[in-house]
Image (cartoon, rainbow, N blue to C red):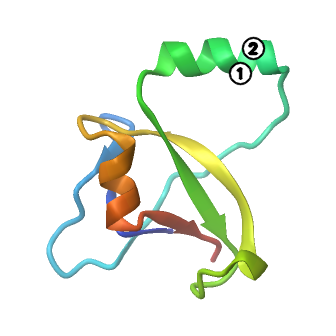
Amino acid sequence: SLEGGGFSRRESCLVESEAKVLHVELPIVLISAMSRKKAAAHRRKQGPLYACPIYKYPSRTDRYLITSIDLPAGESDNSHWTLRGVAALCN
């Protein structure tokens, strides 16, 4: 699930969360390895991305940080989503 923001399935990007909604479902994410060159080309093609941290538990500490994933930032920039505290949580 995603905490601190929303995710538009239609636009496939981060959006503002609805009022009084703490968690929204995030689509299933496939994580795979790729070369740095291919990853850089993919990032350029995607547009602005937010490095969304993934935590094992709702307690956001370094101890429970798994990794981060690049989510399309939509109309806002990275600092907006960082200040909102957007993070993915494992169910």
Find residue 60 and report its image quarter: bottom right
Find residue 78 and report its image quarter: top left
Local crowd size for mark 2, using a 10 Å CA cut-off: few (<14), some (14–19), many (≥20): few
Where disc 1 sits, the SS reads helix
Closer to the camera, 47 or 8?
Answer: 47
Asked if residue 14 is positioned above or below residue 20 in the image, the reply reads: above
Q: Which residue is mark 1?
A: 39
Residue 7 visible in rendering: no
Q: Residue at x 51, y 13 (%)?
A: 45
- Which x, y percent locates residue 79? 35, 49
Residue farthest left in this picture: 19
Residue 38: mark: 2
- Which x, y percent locates residue 5? 33, 62
- Which x, y percent locates residue 33? 85, 33
Task: Tell me the amino acid under the disc marked 1.
Answer: Ala
Q: Residue at x 14, y 74 (%)?
A: 19
Where disc 2 sits, the SS reads helix
Residue 25 visible in rendering: yes
Left or right of 56, for residue 49: left
Residue 75: mark: none
Q: Are marks 1 and 2 in contact (CB under 8 Å)?
A: yes
Find residue 6 and report its image quarter: bottom left
Report how far apart the C-alphas of labels 1 and 2 lie in the structure.
4 Å
Task: Tell me the amino acid under the disc marked 2.
Answer: Lys
Asked if residue 18 is positioned above or below residue 44 in the image, the reply reads: below
- Which x, y percent locates residue 36? 80, 21
Q: Residue at x 75, y 14 (%)?
A: 38
